[in-house]
Image (tube, grey):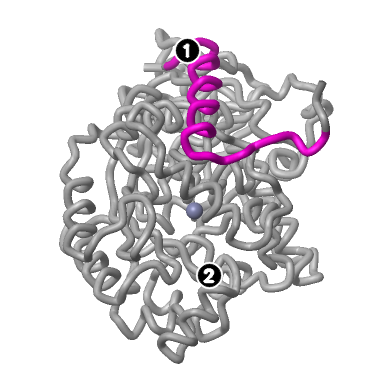
Amino acid sequence: MTIVRGTVVTMNPGREIIRDGAVVIAGETIAAVGSFDEMRAAHPDEAISGHEGDLVLPGYVNGHQHLTGDRLIQSSIPDDLPPGEAIFSWVVPVHGEHSPDDDELSATLTLAESLSNGITTTFEAGTVAHPDRVVAAAQTVGARATVGTWGWDVEQGPYTGSVDEVIERQRAALDLETGPRVSTWVSLVGHDLMSDELVVAASELARTRGVGMTFHLSPTTSDVDSYLARTGVRPLVHLSALGVLGPHVAVAHGVHLDSQEVALLIDSGAAVVSCPWAYLRLGQGVTREFRHLDLWREGGRLALGCDAENAGDMVDGIRTAALFAGVAKDAAVDPTIFGAHDALELLTIAGAEALGMSDQIGSLEVGKQADIVVHDRSRIEWIPRSPDPVLQLIWGSDGRSVRDVYVAGEHVVADGQVQTVDVAALAEEAQNAGHSLRTRSGIKAVSRWPIS
Ligand SMILES: [Zn+2]
């Protein structure tokens, strides 16, 4: 057993915060939550981790993250390309050259960074060539993760195939041995890169197997234009008519929706994962059309995502939550409409609920998995401390103050250092792998300004 001490932000149904509190970890789960004095008295011989001044929270949930493709060429794709060019001239060729070793290395790096910033659960976005290697990476790092694999039945692109081939590939991913913290789900690329037959079959597979399903849709207006031209209706109207939507579905993005599409999401129980940094880096119009706020206000299911290391780049949940709150206020021109506390809900319990995992994670409650994040409030950005720790967490801090992280009770980040992998030892390998990947894929990543 371990007693984790600090101000405990429980995210339980009453949203209780315990000033000098503690969370008791027994094995993989939370055995007790309460005042430090009570926990200490009940468990006098157990080890104590942390201090009264620490801030203790449930692990953060990242609902959309590409674990391969971008990491080894991170922050390399210029941020002034025309729409679509980053994907089809850069990301797709890189994915086409990604080796199994590249998959495992990039997922290891992304998940290690995620843990170091307090993200304990990551939903992979569905562009993995070798899901067994990404599962292995998650197991090594000790992260909780859900992994997908490529699924698209268009003519060209990495790992494209017929409907039957794509479904077989999905089925094989679902059959992987993953261990307790890792799972696999059905994943399509989405957009207008899936036939009706494929999306119907994939949704049916997810329903039959009792797993979730994700695909990309409408980060820009191009999917809207394409569906209108092909089907005469907007994307989610069409997918709803096909019977694809349901509580098992997590739509990545859904930025450009109309009111009917928002209503269809709510009625079907399908979730949306919002990745605000990606929309800003790629200039996709989120500040003009912020339907995610409508979805949230009308009771829809919503989670946050960090997306990719060339689309928002940094894998930091606090930074993402703060941006979402800021865009929500500004898009509505109403500071009262959404705030830090709402954003923290999306990053924890509400995000976990949207993605079907709130029975296990998302709050610090007895019986749930011991996924715990501890922020060190002796750092300069926390001095002096606000009476409202959530306000200060979201607006005044980020992942830098994460000092300790537990996943299923395992102490995976201690004193700010990832314990499960030697990050420094991976640096040279990552540098070489990134260089090789650039060369093989023929992309020309350069500095815009001369470096002598
Ligand atoms: Zn994505």
Where is residue 359 drawn, in percent x and y? 34, 49
Report the front residue among 186 and 19: 186
Q: Residue at x 54, y 12 (%)?
A: 424
Label 2 is placed on what type of residue?
A: Ser
Q: Which SS type dominates the magenta stretch?
A: helix
**Magenta-span inclusion, residue 254:** no
Residue at the spot 25% in from the left edge and 55% down from the top edge: 211
Indicate the amino acid at tag 1.
Asp
State the residue position of label 2: 218
Q: Nearer the viewer, residue 349 or 301?
A: 301
On screen, 47 above or below 7? above
Indicate left or right for 217 with 209 as reference.
right
Please indicate, yes or no, whether residue 135 appears anywhere in the rendered image: yes
Relative to residue 379, is residue 392 depicted above or below?
below
Whether residue 324 can be seen here: no
Q: Which residues are magenta?
A: 421-449
- The answer to whether 191 is drawn above or below residue 341 in the figure is below
Q: Residue at x 45, y 31 (%)?
A: 106
Residue 434: say if magenta: yes
105 lies above or below 324: above
Q: Position of residue 140 (x, y in %)?
A: 35, 22
Residues under labels 1 and 2: Cα distance?
39 Å
Mark positioned earlier in the residue sequence (1 or 2): 2
Image location (x, y in percent) of residue 261: 49, 81
